[in-house]
Amino acid sequence: MNNKMKFLVLSLTIPFILSACFLQPSAKMSITVAKIVTAVDEKLMPINVTDVFPAGTPKIFCWFQWRNAEVNTTITAKWYFVTDNVHILDYTFTIPRKEGFGSVSLAMPEGKNLPSGSYRVDLMSGKRLLKSLTFKVE
């Protein structure tokens, strides 16, 4: 390689290497707060935080707050009936902002109630577990 080419390669490579040294890894999305609640209000804020629900409960909410997300990040709420080791369902949704809060719910059809036992909800981003919460229906 002639001297002119060496200079060109070095002048292009050195700034690239130096800029890469100063780059910070991008922040990963995180769930900063998560709660199991009986309901959410009209502003989507949690009502009655608990992890034990009475028999006859037809619906349960998982309220959460996130930060450092890319806009339109896809999240999946995976619901489990731990008592019988049954995967109930996956609910996938998109979060519209870098930071915010929202909720997902597990609901029985009208006139039915959640069976008594232990439950778990896992909030996932792809294969990455963001938060796992457990609760019980008496």
Image (cartoon, grey):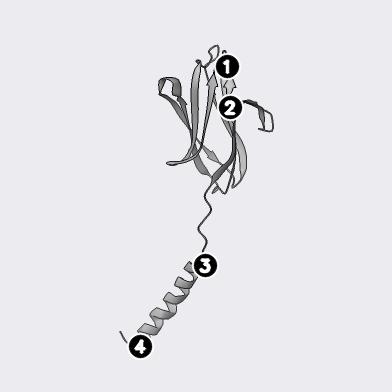
* Amino acid on which disc 3 is placed: Phe
Looking at the image, do the residues carrying marks 3 and 4 touch, with CB atoms under 8 Å apart? no
Read off the residue under disc 1: 57
Residue displayed at 36% across by 83% down: 6
Read off the residue under disc 2: 61
Q: Secondary structure at mark 1?
A: loop
Mark 2 vs mark 4, foreground winner is: 2
Read off the residue under disc 4: 3
Figure check: 79 above or below 84: below
- The earlier-in-sequence mark between 2 and 4 is 4
Q: State the separation of the CA atoms marked 1 and 2.
A: 11 Å
- The earlier-in-sequence mark between 4 and 1 is 4
Q: Secondary structure at mark 3?
A: helix
- The earlier-in-sequence mark between 3 and 4 is 4
Quarter-wise, where is residue 103 in the image?
top right
- The earlier-in-sequence mark between 3 and 1 is 3
Quadrant of the drawing holding the N terminus: bottom left
* Amino acid on which disc 1 is placed: Thr
Residue displayed at 49% across by 22% down: 118
- The earlier-in-sequence mark between 3 and 2 is 3
Task: Report the residue that reaches farthest toward the top.
Answer: 111
